[in-house]
Amino acid sequence: TPSKARDLADEFGGAVAASLDEDGEGSLGSILGGGGPRVVISTLPAAAGFVLPDWILGSGDLPVVFDVNYKPYNTELLLQAVGGGCDVVRGSEMLWEQGAGQFELWTGRSAPYGVMKRAVLENCLPKDDE
């Protein structure tokens, strides 16, 4: 919620954008001083169809885009980001990295990283008919 965002900004430093517009009072562009963000983290469901405003991809330095969705493998945001030349981190990557880290914490042994990555990708990569 906006009030929780303000609480986090107060606690950790930062600002809350009223919009993703490039210009205008409280806009992301005005908060960033004319440049674009360096990192974008999306926790929105893929069904939201969220994409970045065009000005962000045309602002010079491209952001690294994290999208926590692991199904579908390609969200509209990730397709836009890859097409615009951004580095991306997919939800499937976060999922297997988190799983490997948890395995090692719980067992004290090295995680079977390749097996875990393969299992995630087998369930997340689009099938031929998708």
Image (cartoon, rainbow, N blue to C red):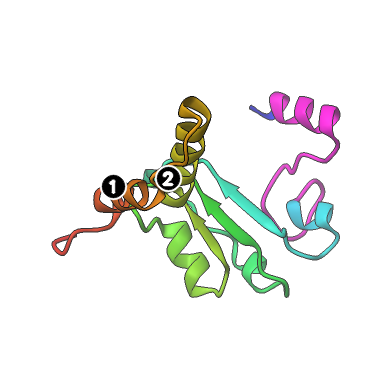
Where does the image place residue 45, in percent across and percent down from the top left? 42, 41
Residue 16 falls within the magenta-colored stretch: yes
Q: Which residues are magenta?
A: 3-27
Q: Is residue 107 left or right of residue 41?
A: left
> Closest to the observer: 108 or 54?
108
Q: Which residue is mark 2?
A: 96
Q: Is residue 35 left or right of residue 42?
A: right
Residue at 62% over, 61% down: 64
Up-down relation of residue 28 to residue 102 (above or below): below
| Left or right: 121, with 19 as reference point | left
Q: Which residue is mark 1?
A: 119
Q: CA distance from mark 2 to mark 1?
A: 9 Å
Judged by its main secondary structure, the magenta piece is loop
Q: Where residue 129 appears, x then y in whole percent?
A: 13, 62
Q: CB atoms at circles 2 and 1 under 8 Å apart?
A: yes
Residue furthest front as drawn: 109
Please state the horizontal and vertical placement of residue 33, each as a whole percent of the image: 86, 60
Amino acid type, mark 2: Trp
Q: Nearer the viewer, residue 106 or 67?
A: 106
Q: Amino acid at mark 1?
A: Ala
Q: Quadrant of the N terminus?
A: top right
Q: Quadrant of residue 125?
A: bottom left
Pointer 2 or 1: first along the chain: 2
10 Å crowding of disc 2: few (<14), some (14-19), many (20+): many
As drawn, the label of residue 68 is: none
Relative to residue 83, is residue 106 depicted above or below?
A: above
Pick the quarter of the image with the C terminus.
Answer: bottom left
Q: Which residue occupies the foreground of this view, 20 or 112? A: 112
